[in-house]
Image: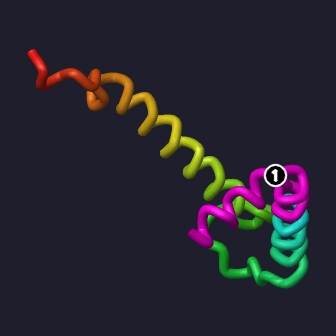
Amino acid sequence: MKLVKLIEVLRTRLRTVVRLCLALLALLILSDALFVNKEHAHTAPEHFPAFWSVFGFVACALIVILSKWFGHAGIMTREDYYDE
């Protein structure tokens, strides 16, 4: 039940959670730009700061969008499917 309380607290303070996440993202981008050696990058886009962060975010968003589409396209069915 502690997890439910944690989720409720986070939902009531959503603006604070979003700001903390954005601050963490900014710190990660800054640390990537300043401290990561890109001398041995394999491809040209890897030389840009925060490339892997953006790549990971886009990949995650695509997975969510495609799985929702796939689910609505045929996997999900009505609840009374077996009642017929």
- Reply yes or no: does residue 13 show up in magenta: yes
Three-letter code, disc 1: Thr
Q: Main secondary structure of the magenta part?
A: helix
Of all residues, the one furthest to the left in this rendering is 84
Query: Is residue 23 found left or right of 28 in the rendered image?
Result: right
Provide residue 33's location: percent of width, then percent of height. 87, 72
Front-lying residue, 15 or 40: 15
Front-lying residue, 17 or 50: 17
Provide residue 35's location: percent of width, then percent of height. 85, 84
Of all residues, the one furthest to the front in this rendering is 1
Q: At 75% from the left edge and 66% from the top edge, which residue is drawn?
A: 47
Provide residue 77's location: percent of width, then percent of height. 27, 24
Q: Which residue is mark 1?
A: 12
Figure quadrant of residue 76: top left
Residue range (magenta): 1-21
Q: At 9% from the left edge and 15% from the top edge, which residue is drawn?
A: 84
- Please name the colour scheme applied to the rendered image: rainbow
- Reply yes or no: does residue 2 show up in magenta: yes
